[in-house]
Amino acid sequence: MENAPELGRAWRDEMTAWLNNQLGHTVFNPVEIQNETLTTEEFENFRSWRFNQRALFKLAVRKLIKRDLDAIDNEIDYVICYWDETVLKGGGTHGEVTLAHRMGIPVYLVMNMPFDDVSSWILGCCEGEFDSFVDLKQFLVEEYSG
C-alpha cells in the first residue's frame, strides 16, 4: 500500500462502493483507517520521520500495523488483495495475507502481473486468484449473494 499510487485508494474506493451496493458488505479500508488510527501530527509527519526521527516513525507505523492486524483478527470475513509491482517493495500486504491464511480467512488475489511472477508463498495463502476485478466481482456474486 505504501508504494502504490495514492496508497491504492482508487481500486479500494471502487471496490468498497461495489461491495456495499451489490452485496451489502461493510469494508475495512486501510487507507481510510489511517486518519482514525494516527493523530493529526503523526499522519502529517510519519513519512518524513522515517528519515530524521526514526523512533517516532516506528511508533506511528506500529499503530498502523496493530490496527490492520486487529482488523484481520476481529473484523473481516475475507481479504481482497491487489498484487502488482508496487506491493513487492513493501511488507505489510505480505504479512496480512499470511496472517489471514493462518487464521483460515479466505484471501482473494487480483493480479496485475503474470501468475508466474507471484511468489509461491503468496499463492499458497490465497483461496482464489483473478486476472481482473471484473472476474473477482463475478466470483464474489456467486459466492456471497443470496
Image (cartoon, rainbow, N blue to C red):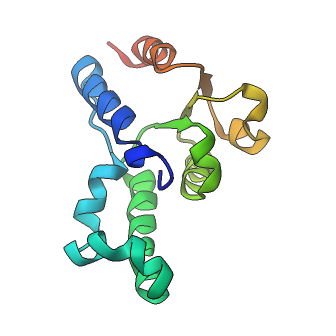
Q: Is residue 106 visible?
A: no
Residue found at x 45% / y 11%: 138
Image quadrant containing the C terminus: top left
In the rendered image of this protein, does residue 65 appear above or below residue 2?
Answer: below
Q: Position of residue 110 (x, y in %)?
A: 55, 28
Q: Find residue 35 and report its horizontal and vertical position in percent.
A: 24, 61
The quarter of the picture where residue 25 lies is: top left
Residue 125: image x %, image y %? 67, 40
Give percent across and percent down for residue 88: 65, 49
Is residue 36 visible in the rendered image? The answer is yes
**Residue closer to the observer: 7 or 61:** 7
- 14 sits left or right of 100 in the view: left
Who's the residue at 49% across and 15% down the image?
A: 139
Image side of residue 46 versus residue 93, left or right: left
Q: Residue at x 36, y 36 (%)?
A: 12
Task: Name the one closer to the observer, 19 or 58.
Answer: 58
Would you place residue 136 above or below residue 125 in this image?
above
> In the image, is residue 138 above or below residue 56?
above
